[in-house]
């Protein structure tokens, strides 16, 4: 510890000294030991901020790449078109579908069975009797003796029939619609209902017969209980809207537009990571080195990413990312030529898929590299660097905390000791006066006069 001079003037001046500033000056040299620790801690925390950004951007790139390398991802997506959307409309084409053309003719649409009752001039008339629907009989009682309450009782019975009351200018009717479409849902109604108000029997009439749709798909006659057909073409669902006067062509194709978007997303995500890395080269505006400048972590990330772009086995006619329209810029970022990518997808879709998804392919290789770089894997370069920083930061923080505690103790002790010394210095003039007074009293000599 260095020495600190205390200037309190003449010993009999009584002015003392500034205890707080003196304590601060005494402890300053000891406190300086924390300077390098705090500088190192700040440098590590600056690295952490960069690692967090890199980890996030690498995760985004990994997710974007997985959409291309996943067997059920965007390369498996399909889209479809109907040559006559008034007859047949495509609902979906999933990854389970296969690109190709299909011919469909529609000779009958599916119908759902429905029945309706005679019209009651007054819908609130009291009913009596019973109504049998298939094998289920609903007996009218006080809780179901109007059209509305009878409809509610049928619905509550859960017998696969939807009941409601239809009212128009002629009166009110009970409507029954099968809960099962097609021929299997055909309703069988036996009515023993009577309008107790008018004593008239209430009969039922067929609104629509239950009927299956009839269609021919690629020469095979099919029947469907619903106009929504999902089993005729694997992975494809379509809606029958009308009878066909001529065969409808359904075309299932690879969704090259979605693939193009996915590749563009990968390029943008890759460029974000490269810009993160480039941003750590050199110095900032204040002349200080960037947090990762010269670090082995930065060099490892740069070299592994660059190497991954040139790796992977060929798949048919595709042997390089440049054949997918991906180009290299001088700063390490990528560019994308959409026309070249579309040409590759339209002419060599299977080869593009293999280049991204086959074992040992470019796509699988880049995925493996990304998994070994980011913060999601416990073996990732970023993850390990963060763990190392965390351990160092914990040690530095502990050292600083311990030193602060030691300084706090010394400050308390010094303050007490120097306060005592200061009080003694400040009391000297009073003590001298007392001595002078005692001397004067004994000798009769007035020490205050000359």
Image (tube, rainbow, N blue to C red):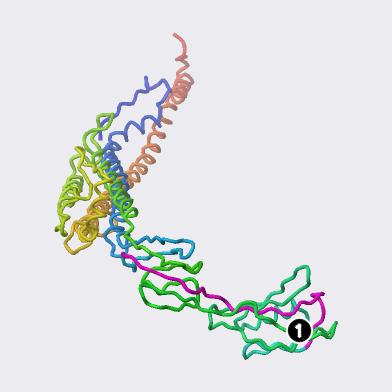
Direction front: furthest residue: 245
Q: Decide if residue 58 is on the left or right side of residue 92.
A: left
Binning the other alpha carbons within 10 Å of mark 1 as few (below 14), some (14 to 19) or many (20 upward) gives some
- Residue 18 lies, in percent from the top left, at 41, 27
Q: Decide if residue 286 is on the left or right side of residue 13.
A: left
Q: Quadrant of residue 103?
A: bottom left
Q: Which residue is under mark 1?
A: 202
Q: Decide if residue 57 is on the left or right side of residue 109.
A: left
Residue 422, compared with residue 63, is above or below; it is above
Direction right: furthest residue: 197
Magenta-drawn stretch contains 160: no
- Residue 300 lies, in percent from the top left, at 17, 48
- Residue 212 lies, in percent from the top left, at 51, 78
Q: Decide if residue 424 is on the left or right side of residue 365.
A: right
The residue closer to the viewer here, 103 or 197, is 103
Residue 365, compared with residue 289, is above or below; it is below
Write the start and end of the magenta stretch as one range.
99-128
The residue closer to the viewer here, 18 or 173, is 173
Residue 127, compared with residue 319, is above or below; it is below
Identify the residue at image location x=22%, y=46%: 326
Tally of marks? 1
Magenta-drawn stretch contains 103: yes
Locate the N terminus and report the quarter of the image it occupies. top left
State the SS at label 1: strand
Q: Quadrant of residue 151?
A: bottom right
Residue 252, compared with residue 158, is above or below; it is above
Locate the C terminus and report the quarter of the image it occupies. top left
Identify the residue at image location x=16%, y=62%: 360
């Amino acid at each position: 510890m260095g020495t600190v001079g205390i200037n309190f003037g003449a010993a009999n001046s009584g002015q003392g000294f500034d205890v707080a500033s003196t304590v601060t000056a005494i402890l300053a040299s000891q406190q300086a030991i924390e300077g390098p620790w705090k500088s190192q801690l700040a440098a590590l925390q600056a690295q952490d901020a960069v690692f967090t950004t890199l980890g996030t951007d690498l995760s985004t790139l990994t997710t974007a790449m997985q959409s291309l390398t996943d067997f059920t991802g965007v390369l498996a997506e399909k889209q479809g078109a109907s040559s006559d959307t008034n007859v047949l409309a495509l609902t979906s084409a999933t990854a389970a579908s296969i690109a190709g053309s299909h011919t469909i003719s529609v000779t009958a649409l599916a119908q759902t069975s429905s029945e309706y009752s005679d019209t009651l001039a007054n819908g609130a008339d009291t009913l009596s009797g019973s109504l049998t629907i298939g094998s289920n009989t609903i007996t009218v009682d006080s809780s179901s003796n109007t059209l509305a309450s009878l409809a509610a009782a049928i619905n509550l019975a859960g017998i696969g029939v939807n009941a409601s009351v239809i009212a128009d200018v002629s009166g009110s009717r009970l409507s029954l619609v099968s809960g099962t479409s097609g021929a299997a849902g055909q309703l069988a109604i036996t009515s023993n209902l009577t309008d107790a108000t008018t004593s008239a029997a209430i009969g039922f009439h067929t609104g629509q017969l239950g009927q299956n749709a009839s269609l021919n798909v690629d020469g095979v006659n099919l029947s469907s209980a619903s106009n929504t057909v999902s089993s005729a073409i694997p992975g494809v669902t379509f809606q029958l809207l009308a009878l066909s006067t001529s065969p409808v062509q359904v075309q299932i194709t690879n969704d090259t537009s979605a693939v193009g978007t996915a590749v563009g997303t990968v390029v943008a995500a890759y460029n974000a990571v490269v810009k993160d890395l480039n941003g750590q080269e050199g110095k900032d505006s204040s002349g200080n080195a960037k947090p990762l400048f010269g670090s082995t972590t930065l060099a490892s990330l740069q070299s592994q990413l660059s190497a991954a772009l040139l790796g992977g086995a060929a798949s048919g006619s595709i042997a390089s990312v440049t054949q997918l329209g991906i180009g290299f810029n001088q700063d390490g970022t990528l560019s994308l030529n959409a026309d070249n990518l579309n040409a590759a997808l339209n002419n060599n879709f299977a080869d593009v898929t293999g280049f991204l998804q086959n074992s040992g392919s470019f796509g699988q290789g880049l995925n493996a590299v990304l998994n070994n770089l980011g913060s999601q894997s416990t073996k990732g370069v970023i993850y390990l660097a963060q763990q190392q920083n965390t351990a160092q930061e914990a040690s530095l923080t502990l050292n600083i905390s311990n030193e602060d505690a030691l300084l706090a103790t010394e400050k308390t002790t010094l303050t007490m000791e120097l306060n005592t010394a200061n009080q003694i210095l400040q009391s000297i003039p009073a003590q001298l006066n007392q001595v002078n007074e005692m001397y004067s009293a004994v000798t009769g000599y007035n020490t205050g006069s000359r």
